[in-house]
Amino acid sequence: MRRFTLITDVHLLLYNDNRILLLCRQNTGYEDGNYSVVAGHLDGQETARHAMVREAREEAGIAMHVDDLTLAHIMHRRAQEERVSLFFTTPQWQGEPRNMEPQKCSHLAWFPVTQLPTNMVPYVVAALERSRRGLHYSEFGWEGAS
């Protein structure tokens, strides 16, 4: 019997003066035209924090140290596949965020946390709200999940 495989992805909740860094997806085949945070999959042979550092560099051109990352939220979610999404935050980074992947991102900017765009990836909105309420774990896309 083949063992169940779970996809793990990482997301960066990067805050600056009550603003959060968001990017608008394009040409990815998933939630194009909607805003999300810097995110990506683990490539294998790397820790989740190392994957987050890599994704921040690849997508936003910023550098951070793995020891400065804090796990803010875990979401077990159901999409086309079952996934566990890890949401990290950090109080410090180096560099000014910029769009490093214009072929996959049409816009990258800081948004007030109280005025998020209406066109956001739904599970990301849920994770942001839940993490800001101090919840460390939630479920999304399951019947009756919260």
Image (cartoon, grey):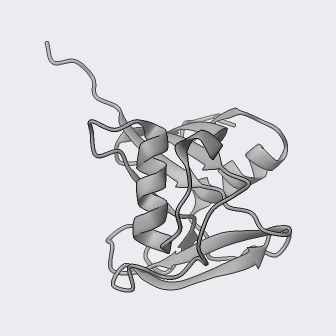
Q: Residue furthest top?
A: 1
Q: Would you say 99 lies left or right of 103 here?
A: right
Residue 145, by quadrant, is top right
Quarter of the C terminus within the rendering: top right
Report whether 62 appears left or right of 137. left
Image x and y of residue 53, in percent: 47, 53
Image coordinates for residue 102, horizontal then vertical, percent: 39, 86
Q: Quadrant of the N terminus?
A: top left
Across and down, in percent, residue 11 comes to 54, 53
Q: Is residue 114 above or below residue 33?
A: above
Image check: 127 left or right of 101?
A: right
Which residue is nearer to you in this view: 5 or 91?
91
Q: Quadrant of residue 110?
A: bottom right
Residue name at image x 67 percent, y 49 percent: 127
Image coords of residue 42 (percent x, y): 35, 44
Whether residue 78 appears in this view of the structure is no
State the residue at coordinates (65%, 34%).
144
Q: Is residue 86 visible?
A: yes
Q: Residue furthest left?
A: 1
Q: Quadrant of residue 5?
A: top left
Residue 5 vertical position relative to residue 31 in the rendered view, above or below: above
Q: Looking at the image, how many numbered discs can be counted on the residues?
A: 0
- Residue at horizontal 49%, vertical 41%? 49
Q: Residue at x 40, y 36 (%)?
A: 47
